[in-house]
Amino acid sequence: GAVVSQHPSRVICKSGTSVKIECRSLDFQATTMFWYRQFPKQSLMLMATSNEGSKATYEQGVEKDKFLINHASLTLSTLTVTSAHPEDSSFYICSASPLAGGPKETQYFGPGTRLLVL
Amino acid sequence: AQSVTQLGSHVSVSEGALVLLRCNYSSSVPPYLFWYVQYPNQGLQLLLKYTTGATLVKGINGFEAEFKKSETSFHLTKPSAHMSDAAEYFCAVSEALTGGGNKLTFGTGTQLKVEL
């Protein structure tokens, strides 16, 4: 149980284009989903917290107009990297907390999406 | 604000030897603590978590961790390392969000290498 999927697993795009990454909770409902970014050999940095039906909360320094987040249902959140540039190349990981989430609740992580912007 | 410190970005052990990965935390409230493992090019998998109750927590793959409030530590151990344990390990502390759910703050990670 508690499986989170991401699609695509890997994407290569040209500079200036937009890329959409999907995050789905497959066997549970998630009120809250999270988007992280991980640079090579570094830790995960939280980008934003996504709540179903409301606007995402972005961490300091993350451009909300560049990283568009939509949490349209209790099982789906999307991250769109707009006008991508080479410096946006990274490993993007989402996670989800079950509907009854609280501070004790485990976040379940997706397998990640490798983005390479040429 | 909460924070996590993982001492040792790289740890190398022999197969069959004890694994000890260190984690210290800072929290203004009773912490909820997690250990995750990450294999190359994959997401994170939960190893174990401490919320309340017994301070010695057992997880998957033979790992366990002990919450020591006096030392603000949550070190991860495994009695006997296996080659398949080679991976990146992250310690994390959780805090509640106003709108519900929790926010994880991760340590910088420890790369575990297991040698024959």
Image (cartoon, rainbow, N blue to C red):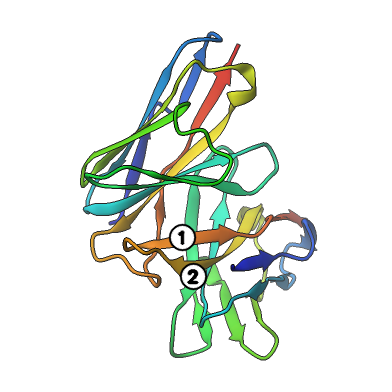
3D distance between C-alphas at marks 2 and 1: 17 Å
Please name whichever residue, B36 or B71, is drawn nearer the observer in this view of the structure.
Answer: B71
Residue at 70%, 86% in the rendered image? B71
- The N terminus of chain A lies in which quarter of the figure? bottom left
Q: Amino acid at mark 2?
A: Leu
- Image x and y of residue A32, in percent: 32, 53
The chain ID associated with circle 2 is B
Name the subunit of mark 1.
Answer: B
Q: Amino acid at mark 1?
A: Lys
| Depicted B25 relative to depicted B36: above or below | below
Q: Earlier in the sequence, mark 2 or mark 1?
A: 2
- In the depicted view, which residue is nearer to us: A28 or B93? B93
Where's residue B54, x and y in %? 47, 90
**Mark 1 neighbour class, 10 Å CA radius: few under 14, some 14 to 19, many 20 or more:** many
Examine the image and state in which quarter residue B27 appears.
bottom right
The residue that mark 2 highlights is B48
Task: Using the rendered image, report if marks 2 and 1 lie on a common chain.
Answer: yes
In the picture, the disc for residue B58 is none
Please state if B72 lies on the left or on the right of A50 as rendered: right
Q: Are marks 2 and 1 in contact (CB under 8 Å)?
A: no
Residue A94: image quadrant is top left
Q: Is residue B58 left or right of residue A50?
A: right
In this view, B61 is above or below B30? above
In percent of width and height, residue A61 lies at: 58, 40
Where disc 2 sits, the SS reads strand
Residue density around tag 2, few if under 14, some if 14–19, many if 20 or more, within 10 Å = many
Residue B103, labelled with which disc? 1
Helix, strand or loop under label 1 = strand
How many marks the image carries: the answer is 2
